[in-house]
Image (spheres, rainbow, N blue to C red):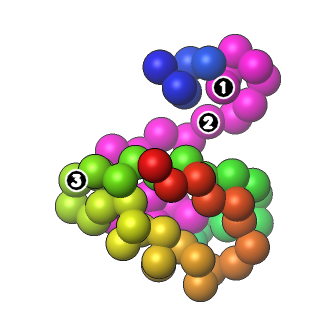
């Protein structure tokens, strides 16, 4: 639902199904990504683990819930 709302507001949204894919996508496109919203209970790598890996990549705003 959050993806739909953000897209309707004009944002480009990249959805991934787990924390491992989130980290991989961010490593590949970190200069174009301005905000990351993580779920605390993601499969394969939870939101906190993903956040810790993402935080060393570069300056990106992360919302963790």
> Residue 34 shows which numbered tag?
none
Task: Choose between 56 and 25: the one closer to the eye.
Answer: 56
In the image, residue 50 sits, relative to residue 13, either above or below, namely below
The residue under label 3 is: 43
Q: Is residue 46 left or right of residue 22?
A: left
Which residue is rendered at x = 75% and y = 55% of the image? Answer: 34
Where disc 3 sits, the SS reads: loop
Q: Earlier in the sequence, mark 3 or mark 2?
A: 2
CA gap between label 1 and label 3 equals 23 Å
Q: Is residue 51 left or right of residue 55?
A: left
The residue under label 1 is: 6
Q: Within 10 Å of the Cα at label 3, are there few (<14), some (14-19), or many (20+) other Cα atoms?
A: few
Inspect the magenta stretch and tell me whether residue 40 lies in it. no
Q: CB under 8 Å between callouts 2 and 1?
A: yes
**Which x, y percent locates residue 22?**
44, 58
Which residue is rendered at x = 35% and y = 53% of the image? Answer: 40
In the image, residue 47 sits, relative to residue 1, either above or below, namely below
Q: Earlier in the sequence, mark 2 or mark 1?
A: 1
**Which x, y percent locates residue 26?**
56, 64
Question: Closer to us: mark 3 or mark 2?
Answer: 3
Q: Earlier in the sequence, mark 1 or mark 3?
A: 1
Where disc 1 sits, the SS reads: helix
In the image, residue 14 sits, relative to residue 50, either above or below, namely above
CA gap between label 2 and label 1 equals 7 Å
Residue stretch in magenta: 6-26
Where disc 2 sits, the SS reads: loop
Which residue is rendered at x = 50% and y = 55% of the image? Answer: 64
Q: Within 10 Å of the Cα at label 2, are there few (<14), some (14-19), or many (20+) other Cα atoms?
A: some
Question: Closer to us: mark 2 or mark 1?
Answer: 1
The residue under label 2 is: 13
């Amino acid at each position: 639902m959050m993806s739909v709302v953000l897209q309707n507001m004009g944002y480009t949204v990249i959805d991934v199904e787990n924390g491992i894919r989130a980290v991989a996508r961010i490593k590949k496109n970190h200069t174009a990504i301005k905000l990351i919203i993580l779920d605390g209970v993601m499969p394969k790598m939870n939101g906190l683990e993903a956040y810790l890996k993402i935080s060393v990549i570069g300056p990106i705003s992360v919302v963790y819930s």
